[in-house]
């Protein structure tokens, strides 16, 4: 169990690091949108790049923060019933829903994304929307990396919950 705890803590720390690192994308997003608004409405000269940069930054922030959000139990759940459950029943509920929904959906998503990322890098793919035509293979990469981090964190949370279900003890 000691090795598992070390692994669990390492995964937690990696995901916390990425979440806090890329939370700064919000600051850059605010600057980008402020610049666009002032440029567009103050000077009548909208930018060609702000739309692309804004969705790149917002996706970077969201995708790299999802695993940490799972760790701190920040994702939406139906708390009306869940909060009344014992720790063991909460863990059992999480185990069941992780097996039924989380693992299959994340697996399918990642399996579908990897060939697209590889193709995108091979072709040095660019966005076909607008006139700026920015490269999008980094975007596709961090979306996939974020999904993989979420899958790994989900696996850790699943194992923690399974431990509680089996032993009735505290989460490791």
Image: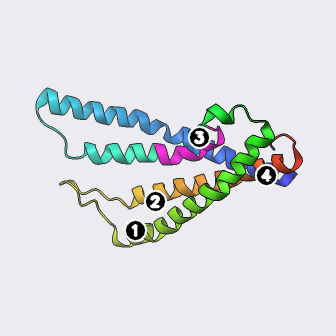
How many angstroms separate mark 4 from mark 3 (CA)? 20 Å
- Counting from the top left corner in percent of width and height, residue 11 is at 68, 50
Direction from residue 150 to residue 170 in the image, left or right = right
User: Mark 2: which secondary structure?
Assistant: helix
How many angstroms separate mark 2 from mark 3 (CA)? 20 Å
Pointer 1 or 3: first along the chain: 3
How many angstroms separate mark 1 from mark 2 (CA)? 9 Å
Magenta range is 62-73
Between label 2 and label 3, give the one nearer the viewer.
3
Q: Answer above or below: position of 4 versus 18.
A: below
Predominant secondary structure, magenta span:
helix
**Picture quadrant where residue 13 is located:** top right
Pointer 1 or 4: first along the chain: 1
Residue linked to disc 4 = 162
Name the residue located 71 percent from the left edge and 46 percent from the top edge. Answer: 93
Pointer 1 or 2: first along the chain: 1
Q: Is residue 80 magenta?
A: no
- Counting from the top left corner in percent of width and height, residue 82 is at 68, 36
User: Mark 3: which secondary structure?
Assistant: helix
How many angstroms separate mark 1 from mark 3 (CA)? 29 Å
Name the residue located 80 percent from the left edge and 42 percent from the top edge. Answer: 88
Residue linked to disc 3 = 69
Furthest residue in direction front, as rendered: 81
Do the CB atoms of the residues marked 2 and 3 lie less than 8 Å apart? no
- Counting from the top left corner in percent of width and height, residue 167 is at 88, 48
User: Mark 4: which secondary structure?
Assistant: helix
Residue linked to disc 2 = 141
* Crowd class of label 4 (few under 14; some 14 to 19; many from 20; radius 10 Å): some
- Closer to the camera in the image, 2 or 95: 95
Label for residue 121?
A: 1
Do the CB atoms of the residues marked 1 and 2 lie less than 8 Å apart? yes
């Amino acid at each position: 169990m000691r090795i598992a705890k070390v692994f669990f803590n390492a995964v937690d720390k990696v995901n916390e690091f990425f979440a806090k690192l890329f939370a700064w994308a919000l600051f850059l997003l605010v600057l980008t949108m402020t610049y666009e608004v002032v440029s567009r409405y103050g000077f009548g000269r909208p930018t060609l790049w702000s739309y692309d940069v804004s969705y790149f930054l917002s996706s970077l922030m969201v995708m790299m923060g999802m695993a940490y959000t799972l760790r701190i139990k920040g994702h939406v759940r139906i708390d009306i019933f869940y909060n009344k459950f014992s720790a063991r029943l909460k863990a059992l509920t999480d185990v069941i829903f992780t097996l039924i929904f989380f693992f299959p959906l994340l697996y399918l998503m990642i399996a579908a994304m990897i060939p697209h990322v590889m193709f995108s890098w091979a072709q040095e793919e660019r966005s076909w929307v607008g006139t700026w035509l920015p490269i999008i293979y980094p975007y596709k990469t961090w979306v996939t990396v974020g999904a993989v981090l979420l899958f790994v964190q989900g696996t850790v949370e699943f194992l923690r919950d399974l431990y509680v279900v089996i032993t009735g003890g505290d989460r490791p």
